[in-house]
Amino acid sequence: MNVLSAWCSTLVCAGLLLAGCVKPVQRGAETQRFRDYLQQQAQQLGIEPGSPLTMQQCEQIALVSSLDLRVRNLALWLQDEQIRLALSNGLPKGKLTFIDNARSNKALTPGPNGPVEMQERHQDNLAISVLQPALDWGLTWYSYRIAVDRKRQEQLLIVRAEQLLRRDVRAAYTQHAGAIRQARLSQTAYQAAEQVLRVARSLEKAQLTVKADTSLVEAALAEAGLQLSLANQGVEQSRLVLSQLMSLPPGTPFAIYEGLPVLPPVPTGEQVRGFEDHALAVRPELAVQDLERHAAASAIYREASAFFPRLDGIGSFNWTASDLVVNKTWFAGGFQVTHSLLDGGATIFRFNLARRATDVEKARTLLVSLGILYDVDLRALRVRTAHETVVAAQSLEVARREGLRRILTLYNEGLEDEAGAATALANLTIQATTLDHAQTEYLVAWHELEAAALPELSVAASQPASTQPTTTQPNPMDWMKVVYP
């Protein structure tokens, strides 16, 4: 047994040594690991810059590459261990005990002929015991059910995270496409302003106009340059947002279809009510809350099991090195009943907490339902508001177009100067950009409504993005051909 004692001591020492061998995380090494991950990610995706990505392709890239979803799925494995941990309460439990004990004096007891040694001064004892729970009044079962509910909650939260990621990708895709279109309009307007300025300077040189007229055209060109710079910045910002949502390495080149798809119609009141009912039936948040209520109900029974005594079967194998014992090895078996008779009322308090938790979760379900209902209604209101903005922008765009036409007529008759034509042209381009921005925001509002209502058929995202805009947008260069054929 001295060998066994030495072996146990060696294991304890080895455990202490291993506990001190954990190295701290090196920030430099982690930075390099992150760089390697980005490079590997870029190679695996294999995005071709010359082949535009559809909205659905961007969604798939985001779902596959999302680090957030990867972390959530890895954390889901922890719930499997929680389930196994809950089941372990009902499985056999074994324990090995080895005792190496030495007294400072002999263990003597009075005898008829003088003191008698009861046990040796140095003792070695070994015991292997097994405990099998037989009756725990549902403690293991309800702990298992709670762990299963927790895992299902995490799965539903991952589903919701995927839905929100799809929503964000669709919105970012739409905004990036709109930024590209608006930058193209600004570029065309800038080129048109440059052409107007060249003509104005030629007329000024021929003394057909004055310097003040040329200055006004120069101001219009400066304004067009400012709008072009802002539009280009918007393209870069929207590209970065979309790239981040797809978890692409910074600077990864990619292209998308920038054409404006057919705008979906405004949802009617009946459709919004249908969206409300559908959201209350399928939103993962409510399913998570339902599981929380089920777990709270299971917790009541789990805490109630503490009011009853536990029944366990026990068995053991024992060995002693004492020479005073004839049977040095023996088996023992039976059962044990354990119950807490006095714990300061903690059992009652835990039971009452579990009961009241069910009332809290029941009320929380109504709160979550109300939040989802208003989420759908507010998204629907934003869609209607965005549609009203689109209608107003379209009306103003028509008015600007008609105003430019009249100014060009006056210009051809010699009743309007270059400055007036340049100003009208700039106003029309700005209004065309405003209209495109309003239409883009309308599509974004539809994507948010879809993520809130989760309709079976996605209205906005089901429309394919074409390579050419489907709405009428003015081209300032066309007007230049009218002015200067």
Image (spheres, rainbow, N blue to C red):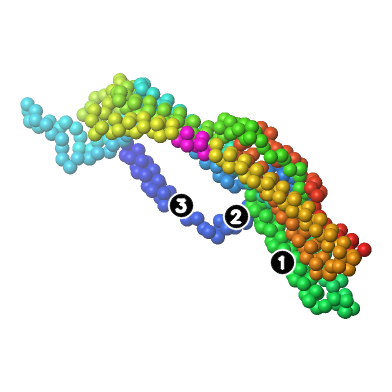
Foreground residue among 320 and 418 = 418
Foreground residue among 75 and 253 = 253
* Residue for point 20% across, 34% down: 120
* Residue for point 78% across, 57% down: 400
**Where the C terminus falls, by quadrant?**
bottom right
Q: Where does residue 345 sit, x and y in percent of width and height?
A: 26, 32
- For numbered disc 2, what is the local secondary structure? helix
Q: Are marks 2 and 3 in contact (CB under 8 Å)?
A: no
Q: Amino acid at mark 3?
A: Val
Identify the magenta region.
Answer: 364-372
- For numbered disc 1, what is the local secondary structure? helix
Above or below: residue 237 compared with residue 390? below
Q: Is residue 89 left or right of residue 211?
A: left
Read off the residue under disc 2: 34
Residue 154 in view in this figure:
no
Read off the residue under disc 3: 22
* Residue for point 58% across, 31% down: 277
* Residue for point 77% across, 75% down: 215
Above or below: residue 264 compared with residue 415? above
Read off the residue under disc 1: 226
How many angstroms separate mark 1 from mark 2 (CA)?
38 Å
Residue 131: quarter of image: top left
Decide which of tag 3 and tag 1 comes sooner along the chain: 3
| Badge nearest the viewer, 3 or 1 | 1
User: Callout 2 environment at 10 Å: few (<14), some (14 to 19), or many (20+)?
Assistant: few
Q: Amino acid at mark 1?
A: Leu
| Badge nearest the viewer, 2 or 3 | 2
Q: Amino acid at mark 2?
A: Phe
How many angstroms separate mark 2 from mark 3 (CA)?
21 Å
